[in-house]
Structure formats: structure tokens, C-alpha cells
Amino acid sequence: MVLHEDTLEGMQQLEVALAPRQEEELPRTEDSGYEITTHTAVEGSELVIDRILAQKGNKFIDPQGNELIFRVLCFSDPVKLVSEEQWNERYFAEAADWGANVVRFAVHPTHLNRMGWDATFEAMDQGIEWAKQHGMYVIMDWHSIGNLKDAKFTNQMYDTDLEETFKFWRTVAKRYADEPTVALYELYNEPTVTAPDTGDCTWEEWKGIQEQIIDTIRVYNPNAVCLCAGFNWAYDLTPVAVAPIDRPNVAYVSHPYPMKRDQPWEEQWEADFGFVADTYPVICTEIGFCLENEKGAHIPVISTEVYGEHITKYFEKKGISFTVWCFDVDWSPTLIDDWNFTPSTQGRFFKEYLQNNK
């Protein structure tokens, strides 16, 4: 697939028209039928996970002042994985073997409600223990796409509202306040107002909403590191230049998929989000690519290993952390082709990169 749009606006229109996100809504069930042990500490574990800070200039640091760079695998929704019997210690062990030092839990609002809050959080409790056993931090991601202010979203699987969003983050902050493994709170996955029927929201309004969420979290967990995204499906951070989030201990998020901009990418990445990394910590919580003929190929993810080479080198230059979407066989761009964890095209590239950069 060849694109001839060379403007950001044109790219947004193409993305909306041609490429809905390749995530499938789970069937509605009355009872998940899933039993899991509740959250308990790992007795006698030699692993010590320090609390992460994000307040030393533009770096993530640990309590000793050491700089941390996160190279992350993004898990699909915990409820999806539970329903497919893939939410298990083996899944986490494989992520660690690939070289991940953080994993991202993509919690979809509708999936959370269908399995139930108690059962979902109990499953995540166990996942956090597995992450801890394998030396990985966790990003908790409220995985919706659209305009939270007006409660207008790109798909019903992302349906939520401000009340539920605040409830989710109160629950997370209270439950994991003393659990440093849950290191990063990604407030909202992909804000956008350029998709059809998503209403209006200014940066000042969105900035204010994020600050209110942060304030709510900090009532229960004053040390939480909160990740804040901009518009255009969490790609655009240009407003941060003049109106950054007015709270300490925050970092910024971008999702620079390959077709967001035409090649050459680097100067445009720098103008759109990379400049923020000169002042604040930045983590690109979704990157990835798939070939044009691969399963689930869609705008904006179609590319080759060339994208992987360019974006990892750019991140190294800027000190930017990143998360690769998606450690799943269904949600593209996939990192694996089957539940034996056979790497896809991008999976082969990123597995080698992660293992070589532990």
C-alpha cells in the first residue's frame, strides 16, 4: 500500500477512512468461569523492584538515581487472555525471555465490565506477581480510543466516561499504592477528536482532565508516575511546548506508528513528539509494524524492518523508552504468530533487538 498524503491532516483522514483498529470485541458473557488466586507477596524472592521516579529532568530514575530505559512488550487485554487461557506464568516468562523489562496491561473498559471488576483485578494481581517473579515492571493502561470529555469513542469496545475513568484510577491507586511493580499509570490510551463523531476537545480541556486524574491518583499513591498522551491517537505532543501538564512526576506518551508520517521520519518525529524528550521523560507506549501482506495489515502500521531500525536508533539517540504492540496472535501488528510464541516479522526484529539490549 502506497500513500501519497504528505500532511498530518491527510494521514489522519486516511487512517480513519481505511483502517479501524485491529482489536476485536470479546463476546458478552454472564460469568467468566475463571478462578485465580488473589494478590500475595512473593515470600523469599531475591528480586527487588524499586519504585520508579520521573522527576530528574527528562529521565526515569530509580531511588538511587540510576537512569532507567524501558523496553516493553504490550500485552493484549488481560480479560481476552484469560478467556483464551493464555493469562499464565508461561506468558510472562516468555516476555522476559524476549528481553522485556516492562509489560503493559491494556485494560479495555468494556472487557473489564464484562468479566467484572473483582475478577479482572484478581487476574491482574496474579499477573503482577508473575511480572515480579520475572523482573519486569507493569504499565497499567486505561485502553480506550476517542474523546473522553464528550464520551465519544471510535468503537463500542472503548466506551467509558469520566466517572468510570476516575473510578478505575482510584481503584488502581488504592490497590497498588504499595506495589512498586505497578510502576507507570497510563491515564488514557489514545485521545483523538479527528475520528468521525468524536466531538470536540481542546488541549487545555484535555490537559485539565489529565491533571484531575493525576490529582485523584495522588490522593492514594503520591508517588505514582503518570503517563500523559496528546491527540491524534496519542501521536501529537506539540501542545506540550507551550502548555505542559502542570503536575510533577509525569512523563509523556506518543504512538509513532510508521505511517503517521512519510519517510524520512526523523525530523518529523522530532517536531511532533521527540522534542519533548529534551525536557521530560518520554515513553512511546505503542510502536510496531507489519508487512502489507501480513495478517491484520492496516493504516498506520504497514512497513518493514526499515521502520524498526530507524525508530530504535532514534529512541537510542533521544533516550526514549518504548513499548511494542502487540504480544498476541490476533491484535495487529502482532509480535507472535501462534501460542508457541513463534515470532512474526516484527517479532523477529524486536526479539533480537531486545535480547541484544538487555
Image: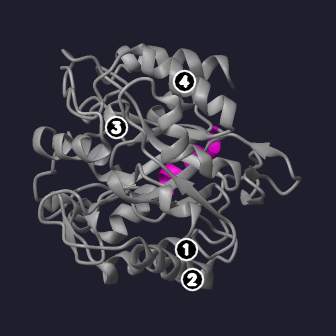
Nearest the viewer among 316 and 352 is: 316
Q: What residue type is labelled 3?
A: Lys
Q: What residue type is labelled 2?
A: Asp
Q: In this view, does 43 lie to the left or right of 141?
A: right
Q: Which residue is labeled 1 in the image? A: 173
Query: Which residue is at the far right?
Result: 64
Q: Which amino acid does label 1 sit on?
A: Ala
Look at the image and name its color scheme.
one colour
Nearest the viewer among 44 and 15 is: 15
User: Which is more N-terminal, label 4 or label 1?
Assistant: 4
Question: Would you call the spot at circle 4 few (<14 residues within 10 Å), some (14-19), or many (20 or more)?
Answer: many
Q: Which of the 4 image quarters holds residue 357?
A: top right
Q: Please name the residue shown 28% across and 35% down the image.
A: 300
Q: Please name the residue shown 53% across and 33% down the image.
A: 267
Q: What element carries label 2?
A: helix
Q: Which of marks 4 and 2 is in front?
A: 2
Nearest the viewer among 3 and 31 is: 3
Q: Which residue is labeled 2 in the image? A: 215
> Residue 319: x and y, percent?
69, 38
Q: Which residue is labeled 4 in the image? A: 98
Question: Would you call the spot at circle 1 few (<14 residues within 10 Å), some (14-19), or many (20 or more)?
Answer: many
In this view of the protein, can residue 227 be seen by the observer?
A: no
User: Which is more N-terminal, label 2 or label 4?
Assistant: 4
Q: Which residue is labeled 3 in the image? A: 260
> Residue 257: x and y, percent?
38, 35
User: Which is more N-terminal, label 3 or label 4?
Assistant: 4
* Image: 86 above or below 242: above
User: Magenta segment range?
Assistant: 125-134
